[in-house]
Structures are given as C-alpha cells and as structure tokens.
Image (cartoon, grey):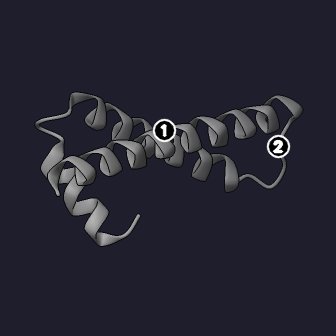
C-alpha cells in the first residue's frame, strides 16, 4: 500500500469498523508469516499454514482495496 492508501485507511477506520478489523488481521498475518519465514526448516503443517496465511492476507488486502475504491468512487 502506498502512503495515500495508508492515510485514507487511517481516516476511514472510525467510519468503517470492518476496515479496522481487516487491517488488524493483515498485520497479524504478516507477523505470523515473518515468524515462520525466520525458521530454517518448516514442517509440512507449517508450510500449509504459510500457504493459508498468504491466502487470507491477500483476501484481506483485496477487501481493503475494494473499500478504498468504493470510498474514492463515492467521494468524487
């Protein structure tokens, strides 16, 4: 996300509770992925967890961008 997106997210969080939840989840997924990424070897279960986290993170990011696009469209 670029700086404009980050600023818009901060401005919209009080108005869009879903956005606050999505951002929190995105950050949590990122932290979990960072932790798993520091490991030298991953078990099969951990590799599946990484794949699941990446999908969930992407799904959340897509929804965040959808909310921002809707806001920009209705604000213009």
Spatial CA distance of label 1 from label 2 is: 24 Å
Say above or below: 36 vs 60.
Answer: below
Query: Given this view, does label 1 or label 2 mark the residue nearer the observer?
Result: 1
Image coords of residue 64 (percent x, y): 39, 44
Residue 15: which disc? none
Q: Which of marks 1 and 2 is nearer the N terminus?
A: 2
Image coords of residue 56 (percent x, y): 59, 35
The residue that label 1 is drawn on is 60
Q: What element carries label 1?
A: helix
Residue 42: which disc? 2
- Say left or right for 72 vs 33: left
Image coords of residue 40 (percent x, y): 80, 55
Which image quadrant for residue 15?
Answer: top left
- Say left or right for 10 vs 29: left
Say above or below: 52 vs 35.
Answer: above
**In contact (CB < 8 Å): disc 1 and disc 2:** no
In the image, what residue occupies the spot 20% across and 33% down?
Answer: 16
Q: Is mark 2 on a helix, strand or loop?
A: loop
């Amino acid at each position: 996300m670029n700086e404009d997106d980050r600023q818009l997210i901060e401005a919209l969080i009080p108005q869009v509770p879903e956005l606050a939840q999505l951002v929190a989840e995105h950050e949590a997924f990122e932290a979990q992925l960072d932790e798993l990424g520091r490991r030298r070897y991953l078990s099969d279960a951990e590799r599946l967890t990484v794949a699941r986290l990446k999908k969930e993170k992407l799904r959340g990011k897509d929804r965040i961008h959808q909310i921002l696009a809707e806001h920009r469209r209705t604000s213009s």
